[in-house]
Amino acid sequence: GKSGAFSLASKRLDELTINKLKIQSMGLIGREKESAVLQNCFERMVSQTVTMNERKSFEPRSSSEKQISFSTQRNKFKELVFIKGLSGVGKTELSRVLKAQAEGFDNGMFVESKFDLTSHEDQPYYGIAKAFSGIVRQASNLSNDCLSTIRTRLVRDMGKELRTIAYLIPELDDFDDFSASSMSLSGNNNIEHSHDRWKHAFRVLTRVLTSILTPLVIVFDDLQWADSLSLEVIQNLISDVRNQNPLQIIGCYRSNEIYDADELSKTMTRLKEIQSKSLFNITNISLKEIEMDDVNKMVMAMLSIDDEAQTRELSELCFKRTLGNPFFLIEYMKMLHREKLLSFSIGTMKWMFDVKKIEDATNSTANVVTLLQGRIQKLPDETQFLLCNAACLGSSFKVSTVCVLAKPEVEAEHGDDDIAKRVKSMLSPAEEAMLIEKSGPDTFRWAHDKVQEAVLSLEDTSSKGFQFEVGKTLLYGLPKKELEEVLFEVTNLINNGVSQGSREFAQLNLRSAHKARRLSAFRSAARFAERGISMLPEDIFSSDRPVALQFYTIGVQMEFASGHSNKAERYIDEVLSHDGFTTAETLPIKIAKARFLATEHRFKETVSYCLALLKEMGYKWMWNRKLAPVQAIVKLEKTIKRIRATEPDFYKSKKRLRKSGHTVVVSLLARILYAAYHNGEVFLNILANLEIVNMTLDHGIMDYSATSFASLAGAVMFVKQDYQLTAKLGDMAQAMQEKIGRVNAAEMLCVVTQFCQLWVKPQDLSLGSVTDAYVIGMQMGETEYATWGMAIGFVGLPFLLGKPMKPIIESCNGVLTQAEELEQHAPADFVQGYWQAMLLLQVSGIEAESPLQLEGSVLKRSEYLDTTSFTNGATVTLAEGFLYLFSGDYEAAAKRALKVGEVFTKQTPGAFYYQIERFNRAVALYAGARQTGKRQFRKAANKLRKAIRKWVDAGNPNAVPYNLLLTAEQAALDHHHEVAKENYQKAIVFVGRSGHLHHAALFNERFADYLLLLHHRSPNDNFLDDVQYPLKEAIRFYGDWGAAGKVEALTKQLDSLF
């Protein structure tokens, strides 16, 4: 019949494309200049890695955490681009111009992610997790060889941290034999360390992925809604000087929604400050509305019209209505088409429109949200219902989640059939209308954030009651695993709509608070805890005290962790205002305060508070604070006697204590010893450490046991000079640490290396320990000792052991940058001191402005010594000792040595640096004595020689070449020439085997100087042959070391002799 024919004709008309707006194929119009800038950034990034004729294939690079380098090659492999503009101006579309270029490489990848209007601070790492989930999903399509390489490197470089980060990125399940969704976060739960641990995990993950997926471009859209933790991660990724693989991060944000004081503005300021040091480029692109001519080009493209005059009048009206906003323009054109104000005539094969009619009909159009709402409201009711529910779930949503929300409606209308199939069918009109789009097999995302905003602005959706019902339906309907994934969204939806307190909803907030804590989102955790507390009944302390303590404890902990001490104190006061609590019940909130005081570096308060808390617990361990020096000495002697009688493997029979009264006591003692050290109470520090040692011997192995044994090793070395016992304690500490695991391992390694190993073992063997401290410390978030491991292992120790200075100097910027970004100022100062010393030693004497003072381009001496860092004075003392000794002005060096005396021992008691500092002073004094004949130099030098000889006799292997050289120097002064020659030659051979270039050069220089002295006293025709070899060797070794000033001076001396 006619109706059937008409229906068929309508269907065929709908299937045509000629009568549709050509939006998808329109391309980017009016952004040619900005597109060129963005592409130039990409070209600059990849050109640093490969030449133009090698573009299509990158070889996978090594990313091993064991092969660490901080060498700052000045190439910038990373690009950071910010694209700002109003909503709808085309920021995301502009970023997509790089998609084809990135994916044109064999393993290149382009990934988009966005932050959510509804999540912000209460869903940490939201956009970061989505980006990496997308990367892992795309990577699953790579070849088996690539996947195998990624898997191997992830397991090797991340270890257990792969499990940690898989908590956020379940797609990583495929790369290890564990289930991320079913596990809890493992390892160190220390609040102070947790966020740094997350940042490092993302950084290592990025290194691994960019070593294979090269180049990698990540787009973060709607950056104005990013949580502060995510912004820190982005900064951490782009500033990683160790990652020399091509990485481009593009951040898009609404320019009218950020202000100077918000987190994004602060992050952008920090990034600008560090870009030079961290070797990345920043490019800012500002998008405005497009001009009238470009609006006309867009209209022509959508209508497939080539004649610009034909669309000019319509375009002028569009420009007037939309102000040149591209997204608004597209929606405006869709509205005209939908309302039949713009239609295609099949008969004439032309688009038909009446500009005057359009102008009259659209005069009241307010904004793009209004247009979108008009489109949404023309969809089927069931589709609108699903969109309203889905808008509450964020920027993307799973079909399975929507099914839970739609189940009652579907079953009522269609019965208990395939709900997922029915839901997809109900969503289909929205997908066809380009309001939503697929982003995965079971996932949709909003085509534009304005679409989600429009749905959320609808009267029904915006009501608190609607959101509450959505949250409640998900709470009761989602399986446990899926509920965990959207826990924050569900909790927020319920919180938005709940009108009165409920224990059930309070527990939901407690659950969210604990999850937020595991993710280091302390502010979010504090907010959830606060909301949960507000839902508890007024009589909660009397009706259910354990539940009350659960809420208030995490509230105290999270408020302190967020830096809100006043609020935390109010919680504590509230708890303590109720009678009947035992010390054990209130201990967690009090320990939280102790932790806060320590992290705030309020050392004096920390000591007093922890001492008071131990007393309140009834733990008796010290006589009186004033008597701490006496008690420490007495207890040290008793403990040493006890250790001597203890088997080295005693720990094997001891239990590993995790949660007990003993571990609580040890945690407080550990804070006392740390704070006491920084507060100048050395004996209290020793006493607290000895208590932990004895508790370990009595009760079992605890988190701080290994570190306490390492610290005791240092005390024994400093006080007793007992090498055998020091070595025993060091071995015990390292063996115990294996039983403990990685908790506090970075601190233990730093302590045992500096105060034990470098005294009792060959120094070169210890480089691995401090670099391990860096790797493990970063993995565990223990950044203070990780940074010390990095500073000592890559700068301090290599320099002091005479390794070539050039590669050390090249590493300094990278090490310093990471220390500063981790806000570890003491290690940063340490690096600056030795960096400046090396720069002064590198240049010639003519070039050096102040060669005998630690001053130059890296630091100003007066400012450096004026800081609160306790290591700076020691660094100046040791570094200037090098400068004076290698200056050649031995009288000045000897005078300084007398003046300095034993001050360095007080600056760093027990540390291995003292060996080198004392030896440098001894050589300076002997050289000064030979040059001037002054008895005071000779007397002081001989005293130091005897002290160093005692080290050798006690078993110090590192002091052997020192003793040989100083014996030669003393024999030379005593005119025992055969003894002098023999010991000079032995010292030169010994140090030559060690690879310590500075000492190899110095020993040869001193021998040559001695031979010249012999010639002056007893002229010999063959003396030139005798002198020539050690002098040339000194020049060679100084050259290899990088001391240009010494090479220049000795070369002149050699030339004058011949």
Image (spheres, rainbow, N blue to C red):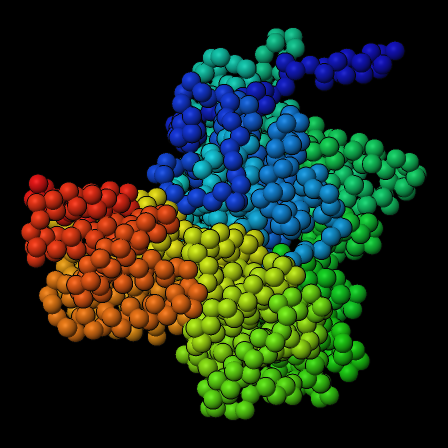
Image quarter where the N terminus lies is top right
Percent from the top left, x then y, of residue 604? 46, 80
Is residue 909 positioned above or below 796 on the image?
Answer: below
Q: Is residue 1050 left or right of residue 239?
A: left
Q: Is residue 1016 left or right of residue 230?
A: left
Image quarter where the C terminus lies is top left
Percent from the top left, x then y, of residue 284? 39, 39
The number of numbered badges drawn on the structure is: 0
Toward the viewer: 224 or 529? Answer: 529
Please give the name of the residue rendered at 53% of the width and 30% of the height, measured from the top-left corner: 60
Q: Quadrant of residue 47?
A: top left
Please give the name of the residue rendered at 60% of the width and 53% of the height, measured from the top-left corner: 124
Percent from the top left, x then y, of residue 973? 17, 65
Toward the viewer: 806 or 758? Answer: 758
Q: Quadrant of residue 108?
A: top right
Percent from the top left, x then y, of residue 107? 56, 27
* Residue 721 visible, this orientation: yes
Toward the viewer: 513 or 871? Answer: 871
Q: Is residue 384 left or right of residue 673?
A: right
Q: Quadrant of residue 668?
A: bottom right
Please give the name of the residue rendered at 15% of the width and 50% of the height, measured from the top-left corner: 845
Is residue 414 positioned above or below 777 on the image?
Answer: above
Please give the name of the residue rendered at 47% of the width and 89% of the height, measured from the top-left corner: 630
Q: Residue furthest right?
A: 415
* Residue 260 visible, this orientation: no
